[in-house]
Amino acid sequence: MDPQERLKEKAYQLGFSVGYYKHMETGWVLKELEKLKRKGRELNVDVMIYYEQGKRDGERERRFFLEEEKRKSETKSHLEFLDIPKVIKLESYFPKILNIPSFLVNFFLRR
C-alpha cells in the first residue's frame, strides 16, 4: 500500500473512532488530526474528506448498534412475561439416557 493510501486509511479510521465513540475533537484527537493534515499537505492528499467520511460512518454504525441493542432489550423484556421455568430438568434433554441420581438432576442446566 502506498503512503497516500495509508494516510487516507488512517484519516478514515480516526474519523470513524471519533464518530463511533463520540470523542471530542480536542486533545489527542486534535493532535492526531493535525499530524495527518501536515502529512497530507506533504503528499498532496486532502485528509479531511476521509476523516469526515469515517466520522459519518462511525456515527451511523453507532446508531445501528444502539438500535440493535434496544431491539434486543425489548425482546428480552417481552420474554420475561412468559412462564419459563427457572430450572430445566436434565431429563427433558436426555430422557433416561444418562443414569444420574434423581437428586442431582435439578442441579444441571440452571439459568
Image: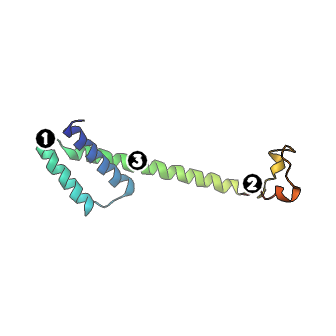
Choose between 10 and 90: the one closer to the eye.
Answer: 90
Q: Position of residue 44 (x, y in %)?
A: 13, 41
Say which element carries label 3.
helix
Q: Amino acid at mark 3?
A: Arg
**How far apart are labels 2 and 3 at the CA level?**
39 Å
Can you say which quadrant of the picture contains the N terminus? Answer: top left
Picture quadrant of residue 76: bottom right
Q: Is residue 18 left or right of residue 98?
A: left
Q: Position of residue 64 (x, y in %)?
A: 47, 48
Reading the chain from its start, which is encountered first: label 2 or label 1? 1
**Residue under the point 87% across and 45% down:** 96
- The outermost residue toward the bottom is 27
Q: Is residue 97 left or right of residue 26?
A: right
- The outermost residue toward the left is 42
**Closer to us: mark 2 or mark 3?**
2
Q: Is residue 25 left or right of residue 85?
A: left
Residue position for label 1: 44
Q: Amino acid at mark 2?
A: Leu
Evaluate whether residue 59 shows in this view: yes
**How far apart are labels 2 and 1 at the CA level?**
62 Å
Residue position for label 2: 109
